[in-house]
Image: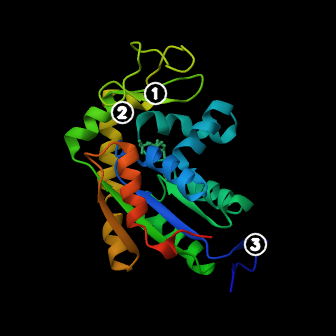
Amino acid sequence: MPNQHPTSNIQYPSAQALVLFGPPGSGKGTQAKLLMQCLGIPQISTGDMLREHILAGDPLGQEISGVMHTGALVADEKVNALVEERLARPDCAHGFILDGYPRTRQQAEELVRWLGSRGIDELVIHLLVDYNSLITRLTGRRQCPQCGTLYNLFSKPPKVDEVCDLDGTKLVIRADDSAAVIRERLDAYERQTQPLIEFFRQSQRRLLEIDAGSDPPQELVRKICRAIPANARGG
Ligand code: ADP
């Protein structure tokens, strides 16, 4: 029987929620995009959604930009509201990939409640990467401000130094990839997010732990896809 929530007019027939979980720099965004292509369900990145509000300069963007630029977390109720609104859109009916959410105990409880009331199962995919590799990845990250393509000076350098391969635009460092902000983001992860693994274990959520430190992204996504149980692929 399809899952349907009484107050929502969208149905979630056999929908599967994948939660990509891991520290900044563990590759959640990259893996979420690759999984989206392979599974045909959307990536919901709270970081991207929040950055869009900052770029738009709307009231929410103005409220959160200070916090985000320090590397600390945005308030739970703001993020929960954004996610809830996003998940109610029709493209989520067969499932979705959460990237960067939940990040606090309050967000996790909210998500579990939301999913539970719709009869949707989630699978938490925990990307494991050691601390030194995270620092290397985060400090080497560059992005094309024109087309959004991501590079890394160490693992995926552009052909010409600091210039986008696709459109020749000069690459930029994301505002929160400076050394001090990286430290704060990793601290916030350790204090507020990492402990959620214990919450997932205790509440018997399905949890897949995967070494995300050595394989190139395309190989890693194949591993993840092979490890996702058939009944967790939505549709
Ligand atoms: P990363 O995982 O590399 O830190 P993200 O793009 O996921 O990158 O997040 C960037 C920033 O956006 C975070 O440092 C935080 O300020 C904010 N943010 C993203 N997701 C959340 C969330 N679920 N709760 C609170 N703040 C968030």
Image position, residue 124 (x, y; %): 42, 66
Q: Residue at x 55, y 35 (%)?
A: 65
Residue 104 in view of the camera: no
Check whether the beta carbons of the residues at disc 1 and disc 3 lie within 8 A of each other. no
Q: Residue at x 50, y 72 (%)?
A: 232
Label whose residue precedes the other's in the sequence (2 or 1): 1
Residue type of the residue flagged with mark 3? Ser
In the image, which disc is placed on residue 175? 1
Q: Residue at x 42, y 35 (%)?
A: 70
Alpha-carbon neighbours of circle 2 within 10 Å: few (<14), some, or many (≥20)? some
Q: Secondary structure at mark 1?
A: helix
Find residue 216 and report its image quarter: top left
- Say left or right for 5 vs 43: right
Image position, residue 101 (x, y; %): 49, 56
- Say left or right for 78 vs 220: right
Q: Nearer the viewer, mark 2 or mark 3?
A: 3
Colour scheme in use: rainbow
In the image, which disc is placed on residue 8? 3
Label whose residue precedes the other's in the sequence (1 or 3): 3
Count all numbered tags in the image, as a single digit.
3
Most foreground residue, 165 or 108 = 165
Residue type of the residue flagged with mark 1? Ala
